[in-house]
Image (cartoon, coloured by chain):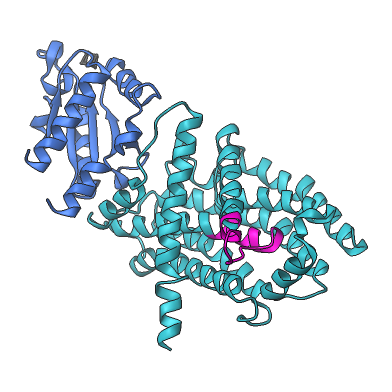
Chain colours: A blue, B cyan
């Protein structure tokens, strides 16, 4: 396996983008970063600027306003950048399927590398999602 | 010529400082994790981060001044490399450097911060400019007491401005830290060091929660890697500078070398504990703090040193 990919999988820096979630998913993400689950031991850090990020974590139902921002964020991120959709809202439209303001699930706007369903998903589910993402990257 | 290149690039210059810097930054992260009751990252974490950043795309924001933006990280890295080389050459052979190297080191130590300011202003981002201007105020505030306390070892060692002679004085007459003036000066130095490394409580320029990494906000890929590396090298070089000035440096004979390394590690753990037990202050509070009580303490230390206590 090449060293570039290996170092990427060992140090995923996460940027969190919330487009109109009910906030439960965000709280679960913060849960995953607390001392109990301690994602830093896998090299996962939350960063404040999209320019530093390797993973774009999207939560919530993407609204028409949010869709524009999501696209711009994805373009601003230095490649390689992975997108992870967290929660049923982001994976599909979930309960907002017929809403007038739904611009579609995340994969209708930017390419998504991993889906973590659940309403909200548990921190354990998120860690499993990340493990699967890393596995898909390294091809195991 | 070849020897000089070896000094700068391998030992004790770039490569050596970089590796120790990455490792000390790991100690920082690990101790922080333990303080917060976590497990913390493995020892190679910072190496993985560095290699990952090297493999990423570098984005130059539209409207920024391209050359300055890309060159700023290099300035800082070069300065910190030279400081490290000077310090270690002094440690290995106190007679090997030139007169006035203390002043050169003091100037060079501010260059990484200035590089951050230049990079921040060049990147045409409002938050980066805000962070850069805060960094500038922070430099103004801590440089005054820091320069003052550098007089204490100079006075005690009989008015020399050569690091080698300060070191020889300490080897012959006991460390400067053990005198009252030296002790006070050391306390001031630790506070200034915290600000020089822009760590909590003085991480005002890059306050993650308010201005999202400040001057670094637009940096990505290799340029960010160089900035991070510079900071991690500073985490090694600035405490080493204090070890040379106040704690008698490192002696390279038998067991003494372990004692020398212990001095550095203790200093590092003090930094990490300060960082983990304090909230961030505002920039005006920081300026008041450094120009008020800290400068006063520094002046007292200098006066005591003049009286020979
Ligand atoms: S998936 Fe559920 S918990 Fe998450 S934002 Fe949507 S409604 Fe809220």
Report if residue B284 is visible in the image.
yes
Q: Using residue A137 as the reference point, say whether residue A40 is left or right of it.
A: right
- For ligand 1, the image quadrant comes to top left
Instruction: Check residue B241 for magenta coloring.
Output: yes
Q: Position of residue A56 (x, y in %)?
A: 23, 36
Report if residue A101 is visible in the image.
no
Q: Main SS type for the magenta part?
A: helix
| Number of numbered discs on residues | 0
State the extent of the magenta-drawn residues as a range.
B237-259
**Image: B75 above or below A23:** below
Q: Using residue A63 as the reference point, say whether residue B87 is left or right of it.
A: right
Figure quadrant of the C terminus of chain A: top left
Q: Using residue A58 as the reference point, say whether residue B128 is left or right of it.
A: right
In the image shown, does B164 or A58 lie closer to the viewer?
B164
In the image shown, does A54 or B235 lie closer to the viewer?
B235
Q: Using residue B211 as the reference point, say whether residue A106 is left or right of it.
A: left
The residue that appears at 25% across and 26% down in the rendered structure is: A19
The residue that appears at 44% across and 40% down in the rendered structure is: B29
The residue that appears at 19% across and 54% down in the rendered structure is: A3
**Image: B145 above or below B102:** above
Q: Residue furthest top?
A: A95
Quarter location, residue A28: top left
In the image shown, does B232 or A83 lie closer to the viewer?
B232
Instruction: Check residue B129 for magenta coloring.
Output: no
């Amino acid at each position: 396996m090449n060293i570039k990919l290996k170092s990427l999988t060992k140090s995923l820096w996460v940027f969190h983008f919330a487009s109109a979630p009910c906030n439960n998913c965000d709280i679960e993400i913060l849960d995953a970063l607390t001392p109990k689950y301690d994602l830093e031991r896998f090299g996962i850090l939350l960063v404040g600027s999209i320019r530093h990020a390797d993973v774009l974590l999207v939560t919530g139902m993407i609204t028409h306003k949010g869709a524009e921002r999501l696209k711009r964020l994805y373009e601003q991120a230095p490649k390689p950048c992975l997108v992870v959709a967290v929660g049923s809202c982001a994976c599909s439209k979930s309960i907002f399927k017929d809403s007038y303001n739904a611009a579609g699930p995340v994969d209708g706007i930017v390419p998504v590398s991993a889906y973590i369903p659940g309403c909200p998903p548990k921190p354990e589910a998120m860690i499993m999602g990340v493990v699967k993402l890393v596995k898909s990257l390294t091809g195991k | 010529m070849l020897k000089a290149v070896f000094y700068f690039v391998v030992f004790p210059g770039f490569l050596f400082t970089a590796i120790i810097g990455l490792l000390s930054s790991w100690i920082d992260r690990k101790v922080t994790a333990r303080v917060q009751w976590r497990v913390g990252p493995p020892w190679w974490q910072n190496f993985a981060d560095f290699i990952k950043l090297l493999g990423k795309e570098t984005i130059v924001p539209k409207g920024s001044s391209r050359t300055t933006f890309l060159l700023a990280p290099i300035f800082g890295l070069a300065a910190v490399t030279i400081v490290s080389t000077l310090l270690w050459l002094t440690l290995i052979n106190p007679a090997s450097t030139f007169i006035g190297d203390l002043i050169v080191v003091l100037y060079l130590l501010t260059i990484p911060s200035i590089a951050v300011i230049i990079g921040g202003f060049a990147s045409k981002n409002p938050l980066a400019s805000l962070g850069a201007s805060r960094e500038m105020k922070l430099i103004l505030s801590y440089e005054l007491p820091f320069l003052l306390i550098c007089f204490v070892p100079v006075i005690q060692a009989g008015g020399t401005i050569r690091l080698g002679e300060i070191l020889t004085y300490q080897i012959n007459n006991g460390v400067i830290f053990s005198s009252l003036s030296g002790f006070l000066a050391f306390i001031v130095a630790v506070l200034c060091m915290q600000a020089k490394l822009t760590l909590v409580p003085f991480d005002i320029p890059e306050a993650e929660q308010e201005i999202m990494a400040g001057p670094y906000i637009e940096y990505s890929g290799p340029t960010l890697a160089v900035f991070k590396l510079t900071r991690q090298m500073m985490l090694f070089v600035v405490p080493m500078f204090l070890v040379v000035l106040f704690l008698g440096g490192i002696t390279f004979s038998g067991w003494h070398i372990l004692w020398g390394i212990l001095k550095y590690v203790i200093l590092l753990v003090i930094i990490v504990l300060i960082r983990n037990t304090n909230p961030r202050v505002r920039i005006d509070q920081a300026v008041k703090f450094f120009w008020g009580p800290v400068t006063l303490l520094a002046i007292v230390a200098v006066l005591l040193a003049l009286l020979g206590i």
